[in-house]
Image (cartoon, rainbow, N blue to C red):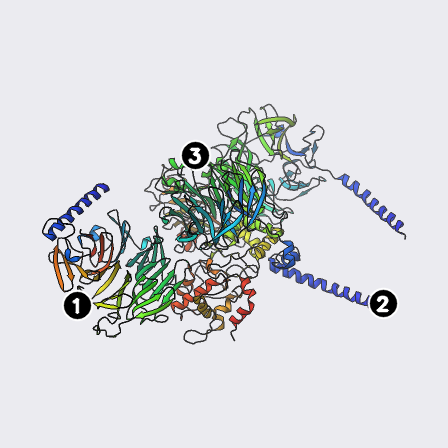
Amino acid sequence: MSLRQAIFLAGTIIAVGLTSIVPISCNSRSMEGMVVFTRVPIDNFDFQEDIIHNFPGAQIVAVNPDKPEGSEVILTTDFYSACSPEISYDAKQMLFVAQRNEHEPWQVWEMDLKNGTSKQITDFGESCSGPAYLPAGRLVFSRQIPGRGAEPVYALFTMNLDGSNISRITFQPHNDYPAGILRDGRILMFSKQLYPKAGDIMYLAMRPNGTKAELFYKGVHNSILHSQAYETMDGLVYFIEWEQGRGEKGEIVSVYQNRPLFSKVNYTSEFPGSFYALFPMPSGELLVSYRPSETDPVALYSFSVQEKSLGESIYNHTEYHVLEPVLVEAYSRPRNLPDEVDDKQSTGLLLCQNINVTATPFGSELNPLLKATRVELLGIDKSLGIVPVEEDGSVYLKVIADTPVRFQTLDEDGRIVYGPSAWIWLRPFERRGCVGCHEDPELSPENFVPLSVKKQPVSIPVESTQEHEHSSTVIIVE
Amino acid sequence: MNNLSRIFHKAIKVLSAILLTIYLTGSSFVEKDIFPEAGSMPVYGNWETFTRKDGLPADKAYCVRMDGDRVLVGTSAGLAVYENDEWRTYTVEDGLAHPGVLSIDVSELTGDVWIGTLGGLNRWSAGRFETFTQFNSGLANDVIYSVICDGKDVWVATGGGAGHYNTYTREWGIYTERNAPMHEPWTYGVCAGDKKIFIAAWGGGVIEYNTETEHFRDYIDPDGEMEIDLFADDGVVHDITTGVSHADGILWVATYFGLSRYDGAHWKGYFDHDSGLISNFINFLKADGPVVYLCTDLGLCGFNGETWVTYQRNENDKKGKILITNGSETKKLVASTSISHNFVIGVDFQGDEIWLATSKGVCRGERVK
Amino acid sequence: MRKYIKFLFIVVVLAVFGLLRIPVHKWSRQHVNYITAVDDHPLNCLSCHMYTQKDGVIAKLINADYLSPFNMAVSPDGSKLYVIAQEGNTLLVVGTETDKVIESIAVGERPHSVVIKSDGNSAFVSNQWADNVYEINLTSLKIVDTLKTGSGPAELVLSADEKFLYVVDSYSSEVSIIDLQTRTELKRLMAGNNPVAATLSPDRNQVYVTSRRTLAMPYGTPPMTELTVIDAATQRVKERKIFENAYIMENVAFTPSGDMAIATLIRPKNLIPAIQVERGWMMTHGIGIIEPGNDGRIIQLLLDEPNAYYSDPFDIVITPDGEKAFVTHSGVDFVTVIDLHAIRTLLAESTAEELDYYSNHLGISSRYVIKRIPTGANPKGLVLSPDGKYLYVAERLEDRIAVISTEEMETIKTIDLKGPSRITVARKGRRLLNNAGFTFQNQYACYTCHPDSHEDGLVYNMAGKDMGRNLANVQTLRDIGDIPPYKWNGKNSSIYKQDGMRFSTILTRTESFDFDELDALVAYIVTGIKNPPNLRYNPNGELTAAQKRGKTIFYRTHTNCGKEIPVENRCFTCHPPPFFTNMEMADVGTLSETDDPMLFDAPQLNNVYESAPYLHDGRSATLEELWTTFNDEDKHGVGNDMMKDQLNDLVEYLKSLRDAKYYKDNIETYKADINPE
């Protein structure tokens, strides 16, 4: 074969190869830059305080925000209901929850945005909701589990994207639901206490293995946190809050991730209508779901945070509310936090530096005569034991893992000094420290060797006091 | 209130000094002729005693060191500091190595106070105590009988040898019978002078260390007699030495058997039977200029090579006794105030004040002019 | 036939390669797995075998000589900036209008600070690794005199009349006072532990000196770090101000009115079990304030926030109007701007109890922090232009100076000092080591516990599997590349393993380094961290008399009584040169009740004098205590027969031990030491 023939042959092969590739490429679609959202039939939209956002009959739809007219694509035509779209870090996949048919449990699905094919990730007898991507090929979602009464409750689970290696990560008598992933790698979740009495919806932050859960943000009493929360590159976390006392409307607020409890900014206090959802755009603007009045459907708008002004409507539909907008665009992956949980263990360790450190403001001290010398751990139904604390107020406990507990501190006479606290739980082999009991959440610990850690930890439940009733004396502070 | 109290206190002191002078001389106040027998030797009076009642941590005081406006006293229960007419005590809780403070010196260079205790050595610098012990440092032994500062160097006499600490290099040296001409490691006193260090070594006389050549030599009692000084002025009076002090080119050596003076060429001995020395049992001595003060079991002696002035306390009437001896003549005077106790262990003097540490309290005398 | 042989040869070679490929790959995999302690590290031979080259042509090719600007001074007219290039060993003269390096003056080893006389005609530069100060004529740009100092001269301060120079001796923990008329050192005053910075009070009567390491405290008690106050009139230490539970006080500045002196500091949590990072459980960072007019009240306030930490605060300057302070955070690449009016208000309205509470409060910074200005890598020294309008920031690992408008509180330009333009692997590693971004919420960098890549002198409760257990004395990172294993119990066979996944699980508690980052970090640790010269105890290899005697004891084979010391119990068996470690495990009898039963990795002894406290849990405050207190059973070498002066000699010898290179270069000598026959 001559050189010329060889070149010709090679060129032919390459040309044939290219022509075979092009049609394949044309079969896929690029979703980059599209806005995906959930649209909910107006008739099926029953906005409640509930934090679980599974809307019957809802669809996930994509539009080109620059040319919304005619660009509308329904992505979940194969499903009776679908909602909660969540885009992967590389913008190639989308998690969502859906039900194939009415009355079936909602399951988590993942869609390949290139070709629109979906694969089912969860397959439970109960409904799931609110999936979110975690680093290292995992996801977090909320799943129904049996509650104390007839009503099921929701707890958070994580699993691999192939459906394997499922792990439950929250264990409190709350409804827990993912609200987002912070850039530092923690899961932000809605959490609403159900027992012993209903509480307000709060954002809690915790590691993806369910450890170190702590309060991230809560509004004034009876306020409602409604939307997913998104952290931007400048460290602000945006979400929608229905603040008690400010009218029945959702407002766009942000908190500073570095100091979320005391940095709230309200951007829409002057707006008459109600906001339902938001999503930060790379431009700094927000995609928002806004309902100008009760008679209008919720529509998709852009919103300028700088100007505190609403842009033109991007998408609206007379028969649907537009909720849960997300932009299909790659974004930086949060930190992949290491996992210290050891499932072979059955307990976790808890150190409280000084049970008498509380969040009491200066000048309003507790009754100085009441110094707590013991701490009582309360389970769901019974006391798990009363433990005397060391001279320095410290206590070191080995607590049965994945079990909700609360604390109350007692004085020498068994009177309750403080508590009961909020529920906490420890994961297997989790080791956790507290500065005090219900202490100022912004207080870092004093640097000293707690006397209690010089000894072995006290096992909880304490055997001899397992069956004791709760202390029933007067609660001084709750 | 403090100021008022101070003014009142000063007034009382001045008045007392005047009354003392009148009492002692029995005549009107004549400045220069008060104690003609004393010659150039200062005479102190108007003694004021401080005990636990006055704020000292213990009555037993081991040493005293004047440092500008304050006086540092080592007691059996801590370091006491007298400043602005008030006593303040520092104990083990404050960082002192041991409550028994045996010796104190102040670095002229840095102002740091070096404190020898029964349980280690302290550097006390602007409120911070740093502790050196035989366990955590190269200190020879924790019982520090004497400490002195010589420029950047600190020397200690300990129960386990003499020690040297170079504060720049942090190097410790230990000098015992293993590497120095000593009889045994027990050392009682140390002083510096003429680029030499003199160590009072128990049973070893005086050990001289030349800081330039880094060589030792010893001065022992040539007659080797332990009971008496067999040959007068042949050397140090006894091998068991308790203190050394160097000033004006003269080395003074204290023993329990008399006093020695060495001018670099000749030794001379002084005893209670042939001089104004009140007792051969000398606990401590300190020289400055031509004058040396000797702390004995029978009182305090001052000596300038010619005149002896001795201060004692009459335990019966609590009055003071002053003996001025020139040659064989001694003049005895009675004073209205006295040193706190005749068992004197420490002395320091600066300007017109002298301070004594005794087995029962600390006292301050003022020069009578 | 020959043609066939050639063919056969090729076939055989290919066959051999083919046959060996699998076992070689398998061996390589096992080897890399062992070194990295993971099974998915790419089989990249360059990671270990090229980037970690310390000498030779390859090392020269892959590395670069950076400048590393550190501290600075500005000329009285503001036209020139004098920049200490810490690793360039130069003083760079930079035109502030041209933004160009005008001159590069070679100075001594590892310069630290520069101070300019008020007439602008001469400068003094401290050479930290040469134990001297250069005087430089700023007209001729020549070195005109060398002044001897204590060990590790750092910050320099001129007295009010400029007749005396105060030199902070960082290694010997002193302040040298140099008479500039006689050119001699008058005296040395004891400072805090590892002092580095100093400043003259506005009334020019006092010199404040900050230190980095805690004073020697009783074991298990919180760190206490000293700020030394020197009376300029008496040239004596007037006061020692103690900052409780704080250390690493890198710099200090006075307000123009003198109402406050503010120092940067870190508040470590070393005594608390290291079980989490959340809520400032490991490190917090802030400032220490002294109010001279308020009985010298000492206050500590944090610059952190509840979910964000601003690690490794380094320098601080205060504007001429006394309204703003600027602090560099070299661990997070930020400058914090502090509103001093807000600080004054807070101090005025708060009780002592409240202020004590605030010292641990992560939210209080929102009261006075008004801006965080991002910078280039590893910002260190700061200096203000004479008019206070511009703030110059030395971006150490960027070889660059940032210029910040103090009014706008924004970076307006940067000045390139013209260091090497490429970033080497080791340089990347150095940035990683200095950056807290690899710890959860940026709470601390490797550098935080390893300042100057050494150790911080603290003992941390690493809380093995139980909270009261596993107390660990921080170990140095200097020259450790060739002495595996790592960790006191030798659990980590390589630096890869030491800094790998487990490191992130138990220490940084965030995402672990990726393999490229780990390569870079290892490359820097192995090649870039040297021991400073042991000028203090062994400047030229000539031992003192005591050190020679001590050396004899170190290499002895018989006790004082003539009894033979078992080989395994001789000093040099476990501690042979050049690193003075045999890299083996041994039982030296110092396991504590809170340790899991295990042996000890024999530590290296190069420059051991600067690594107090000693033993794996830091219980031995001094070298002496190793044998006076913690060697009852003679397991840590036979020592109980020694006289005290012998022990002193041994300690003197140990303090004389220098960097390993010295012993490698004198290999015959130390071989003879080990085998005298």
Disc 3 crowd rating (10 Å Cα; few below 14, some 14-19, many 20+) is: few
User: Which tag is nearer the camera, tag 3 or tag 1?
Assistant: 1
Identify which residue, A315 or B17, lies in the foreground.
B17
* Residue to which mark 1 is pinned: B274
In which chain is the residue bearing label 2? C
* Residue to which mark 2 is pinned: C3
Q: Which element carries disc 3, helix, strand or loop? A: helix
Q: Which element carries disc 1, helix, strand or loop? A: loop
Disc 1 crowd rating (10 Å Cα; few below 14, some 14-19, many 20+) is: few
CA gap, disc 2 to disc 1?
122 Å
Q: Amino acid at mark 3?
A: His
Q: Which element carries disc 2, helix, strand or loop? A: helix
CA gap, disc 3 to disc 1?
78 Å
User: Which tag is nearer the camera, tag 2 or tag 1?
Assistant: 1
Q: Amino acid at mark 2?
A: Lys
Respond whether the residues carrying marks 3 and 1 are from the same subunit. no
Q: Amino acid at mark 1?
A: Asp
Q: Position of residue C477 (x, y in %)?
A: 53, 56
Q: Which mark is residue C341?
A: 3
Q: Position of residue A228 (x, y in %)?
A: 57, 36
Question: Outermost residue toward the left?
Answer: B26
Q: Is residue C164 visible?
A: yes
Disc 2 crowd rating (10 Å Cα; few below 14, some 14-19, many 20+) is: few
Left or right, C49 with reference to C616: right
User: Which tag is nearer the camera, tag 2 or tag 3?
Assistant: 3
